[in-house]
Every structure is written in C-alpha cells, then in structure tokens.
Image (cartoon, rainbow, N blue to C red):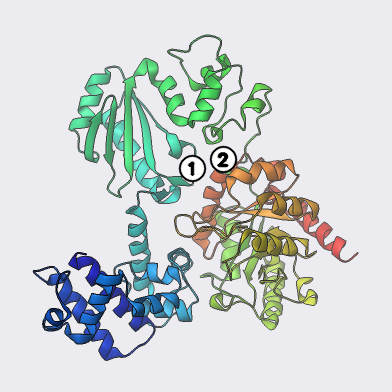
C-alpha cells in the first residue's frame, strides 16, 4: 500500500473523531501523523512497528494503526467510527472546504445527512441561520458542491443552459451564414446533460471544420472525422458536427432524437431522404406528424404521430397561477404579500397557493397550529386588498412515517388545498415507500402529492416506489401529482407523465418557490412537462382562478359530505 491511501485513512479517522467530539489531543496528534505519513520519503509498507514509531510525529499509537491497516486493509477504530456515521456525512467530509465542525452543525443541528440535501438547503437559504454560517459561507458551500458535481461530467440542464446558449451565439458569430442548432440531450430538454451536441451546416464543410479546430472557442479541442470535440469552461463536453448545408436537417434530425426514435422514424420512409429541406419533411415522408424535439425519446409518440393525435404541449402562457410556495412564515425569504404582488404584477398570474411547511418540519420553521391560524388571518386581509388576484390557503403537510398527515382533521379542513410530501426518514424499501404514499393519497384532505420520490438530481436518488400503484391510487382518489419545477427535483419524473395522463390524473407544475425569483423555475417545470407530453387540459395550474376555485371546492365538498 502506498503512503497516500494510508494518510487518507488516518486523516479520515481524525476528522470522524472531531465530528463525534472525541479527545482533541488525540485528534490533533492523528491529523499531524497523517500529514507526516503523506510526506514520508520512503514507503511505510515493509517497515516494522519499531521503525514506524521512531518516525517524528507518528509515535506508538499511530504506528499500531498503520500496521493494522497494512495487515488488514482497515482499522478497527475507523470501522467503529464509520458504523455510527451516515454514509452521506462521510461523503460530505470529502468535499474540500467543509471541515468536521461545519459538517457536525449541518448534520446535528439541521438534520441534513447527505450532499444532495445540503445542496438543496443552500438553494433554499436554510444554512444562513445556523451557527457559524452566513450568506458567503452558504454560497461557498454551494459552489464547492457544484464543482464536485461537475467533476463527474454530468450537469443539470438549468446549470448549463446559459453557457450553452452563449456558446451557440459564439458559433453564430464565427459562421454568420451557417445553419447552427442544438441537438442531442440539450435540444430534447433532458434534465441531466452529459454532452452538448451542436450541428453546424456550412457551404464548405472542410473550411468550417478547420476554422473550428483552429479556434479557441473550446478547451481541449480534438478533431474526430467531421466532429470537433472539446469542453466549455465549466467542464461540459461539447461535440460540434460539421456538415454541408444540404445535409444539415438530416444530420440535425439524426443527432436530436435518441437512437430508438430515429430508427423508428426512418424505418417508415418509403424512399431514402438524402437532402431534406426541413425536419418536418422527414416526418411527412415517413407518414408522421412533426414530433417536437422534446418528445423524441423512444417510440412513445410515434403511433400518435401516425394518426395526427400528438398532444398540444403545455406552454408558459397557459399557466394562470402557481401552487406550492413558501414565505417567511416558514423557510422562505419573502413575505406572503411580496410573493403575491410579484405573481400579480410581474408574472401577470391570477392566483398564488401558499404552502408553508407543517409543524413536523422543525428544520424549516414549520407552522404550529396557532401559527397556521395567524397566517390564515393575514391571507384573509390580503385577499380583501389585492384586486384581481387571490391567495389560496395551502400547506405542505409532511407525510409522517405511517403515512398520516401532519395535522389533525380539524386543522386540515381549514385549508383550501393540501400538498402532501415526504421530507424525513427517506431510507425505505419500495414496499414501505409505496404504502406510505398511498396512505397519504387516500387521506381525503390530500389535494396534491408533492415531489413523489424526494429525489435530488445528481445528488440523491429518490426513495424507490411502485409508480403504477402510486399513480393508480391518485387516479382512484382524485389526487393531483406535482411536477416539482425546482431544477434539482423535476419530480414526478417525465417518464411517468404519460401513464398518469392515461389514468386521468391531473398534473400541476409547481415551483416550490422559497423566494420571488423561485417562481421563475416554472420555466424548467414547463420544459420537463412538455417532455412528458403534458397538455394544458390536464395541467391544474392552467385552470383560471374561477376554475381552480371550483376544483378545490369540489374536493372539500366531498370531504364534508
């Protein structure tokens, strides 16, 4: 074993000891020994205990640990420490810049147990109130986590969108007469981007190719046949496909859809399509209605394209209001009035659904019963003064471990609508997670199932659920399913939108906004909703104020008999 792995394990042990508030002298001694081992000019392996203990800064205790590590591949003391530390906390300590003291506060005071939850907490402004943290520290931690994500080569769509568009504009500046368009995952609005593909059509393919290879628009430029590969400054891989203009639309079509979709379309062509003048022509010659780029995953929409029955996809103008939002009553940044005025005056919406956290969400200043009643009084006052706009009284009620909601019925019945979500005890098998959700769905007060799997993209997998059973339960109980528009969530996953729609389930594009700017995340919710094939007739917040008021009233009238 080389010295560096030994030093790493010794360092990890010292950090875990500090995390669990062990003897400070032992911690300092072990950290110093880890540093010494890392800098040794000879390998520790092969040295005897007697030789190691004489090395300055190591001593008997650390020497015995090194010998144990060399003989067994591990240390009993390290194993014991790891056994009482959540895996996500250990991973968190691997991020440079977040030391054990800060990790201890994040874990023990805020109840955060993995990097995904930490990143989400940074985005929701939850770290600033913790001891020893502030806005700058919170921003530094967020940047560290984003850097860590980027090092794995995967990116959230929302995090690369602007850089991708800026890069496209650069190419247009270099090739003003060229045909240039995004393709691949980015054009299909995939939630995670592994590679940015752009198709470039020019009159002289070779000149364009050479110009691009010799340019400095990308880092690590590498020519590969008619492809020019490289990386953007943020680390995102880029591939520019250079073709003659006459082949542009065929190449764009082939580079946009996934393999299954492209093959399915081309298999329906009667004659070869060599130089189409548009993508629309490719579909028409295949006997199909034009399929929007975001729907070009597999063959799901091919049959509908054959019979001209593709959905009229929802768009931003269709949205009339926004549901599931947080204010200063819990963990939000803006007041209810500030959120309402922004929606009315800036976004030109008709209504706002306030859904602050329920009482069990202590980490997010969840509302005790008396505070629920106080907030309702404030909303009543605001509704009297806000002309042409309405605030609905909602709550994001925690789904407790047994599937029950977080308030007694006499409080639940006071809300206009309820978003039921899981926020705690996320380690469940599929059977437990599914039954927990279904019990909450069957609660007559549940209006919307919030972020159904609890996933945080690139950070935390959602708890496993039986999607069909959960969606079927929503259909049977007239419960809406949320498409959480936060770019970290985008949950319900778009791959299940069609099954929900086929079952007659309504979907709601909810920003889960914790500040005014959070409403803008509805843009990403729209993208992923379109990808799932959502149309406005089944989008809850595409209903007008009068229509959604009736929708909520019908739900509550059923409860009250």
362 or 103: nearer the viewer: 103
449 or 126: nearer the viewer: 449
How many residues crowd around disc 2 within 10 Å: few (fewer than 14), some, or many (20 or more)? many
Q: Quadrant of residue 264?
A: top right
Residue plotted at (76% across, 44% down) = 504
Q: Residue furthest top?
A: 271
State which quarter of the image contains the C terminus. Answer: bottom right
Judging by the rendered image, the residue that carries numbered circle 1 is 190
Q: Are marks 2 and 1 in contact (CB under 8 Å)?
A: yes
Q: Quadrant of residue 224?
A: top left
Residue 355 point in image, percent of width and height? 64, 67
Cα separation between marks 2 and 1? 8 Å
State which quarter of the image contains the N terminus. Answer: bottom left
137 vs 27: above or below: above
Judging by the rendered image, the residue that carries numbered circle 2 is 531
- As helix, strand or loop, the secondary structure at mark 2 comes to helix
Q: Quadrant of residue 56?
A: bottom left
Number of numbered labels in the structure image: 2
């Amino acid at each position: 074993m080389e010295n560096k792995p030994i030093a790493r394990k010794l360092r990890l042990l010292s950090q875990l000891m500090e995390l669990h508030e062990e003897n400070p002298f032992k911690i300092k001694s072990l950290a110093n020994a880890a540093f010494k081992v890392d800098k040794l000019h000879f390998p520790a392996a092969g040295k005897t205990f007697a030789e190691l203990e004489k090395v300055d800064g190591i001593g008997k205790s650390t020497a015995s640990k090194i010998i144990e590590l060399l003989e067994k591949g591990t240390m009993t003391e390290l194993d014991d420490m790891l056994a009482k530390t959540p895996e996500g906390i250990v991973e968190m300590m691997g991020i440079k810049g977040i030391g054990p003291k800060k990790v201890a506060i994040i874990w023990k005071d805020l109840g955060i147990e993995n990097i995904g939850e930490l990143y989400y907490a940074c985005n929701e402004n939850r770290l600033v109130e913790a001891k020893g943290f502030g806005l700058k520290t919170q921003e530094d931690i967020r940047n560290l986590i984003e850097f860590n994500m980027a090092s794995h080569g995967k990116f959230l769509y929302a995090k690369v969108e602007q850089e991708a568009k800026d890069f496209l504009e650069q190419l247009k500046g270099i090739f003003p007469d060229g045909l240039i368009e995004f393709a691949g995952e980015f054009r299909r609005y995939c939630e995670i981007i592994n590679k940015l593909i752009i198709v470039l059509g020019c009159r002289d393919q070779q000149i364009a190719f050479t110009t691009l290879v010799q340019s400095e628009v990308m880092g690590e430029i590498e020519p590969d046949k008619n492809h020019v590969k490289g990386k953007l400054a943020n680390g995102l891989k880029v591939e520019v496909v250079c073709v003659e203009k006459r082949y542009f639309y065929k190449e764009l079509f082939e580079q946009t859809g996934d393999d299954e979709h492209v093959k399915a379309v081309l298999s329906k062509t009667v004659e070869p399509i060599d130089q189409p003048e548009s993508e629309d022509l490719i579909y028409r010659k295949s006997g199909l209605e034009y399929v929007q780029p975001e729907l070009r995953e597999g063959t799901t929409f091919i049959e509908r394209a054959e019979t001209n029955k593709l959905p009229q996809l929802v768009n931003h103008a269709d949205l009339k209001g926004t549901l599931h939002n947080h204010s200063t009553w819990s963990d939000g940044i803006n007041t209810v009035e500030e959120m309402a005025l922004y929606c009315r005056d800036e976004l030109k919406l008709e209504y706002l659904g306030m859904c602050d956290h329920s009482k069990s969400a202590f980490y997010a200043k969840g509302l005790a019963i008396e505070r629920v009643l106080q907030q309702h009084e404030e909303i009543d006052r605001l509704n009297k003064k806000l002309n042409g706009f309405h605030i609905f009284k909602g709550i994001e009620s925690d789904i407790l471990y047994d599937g029950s909601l977080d308030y007694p019925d006499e409080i639940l019945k006071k809300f206009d609508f309820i978003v039921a979500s899981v926020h705690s005890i996320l380690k469940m098998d599929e059977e437990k997670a599914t039954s927990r959700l279904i019990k909450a769905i069957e609660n007559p007060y549940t209006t919307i199932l919030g972020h159904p799997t609890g996933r945080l993209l690139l950070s935390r997998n959602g708890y496993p659920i039986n999607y069909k059973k959960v969606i079927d339960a929503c259909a049977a109980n007239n419960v809406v399913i949320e498409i959480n528009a936060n770019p970290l969530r985008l949950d319900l996953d778009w791959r299940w939108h069609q099954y929900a729609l086929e079952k007659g389930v309504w979907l709601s594009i909810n920003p889960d906004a914790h500040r005014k700017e959070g409403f803008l995340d509805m843009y990403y919710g729209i993208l992923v909703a379109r990808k799932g094939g959502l149309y406005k007739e089944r989008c809850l917040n595409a209903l007008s104020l009068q229509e959604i008021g009736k929708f909520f009233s019908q739900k509550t009238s059923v409860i009250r008999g």
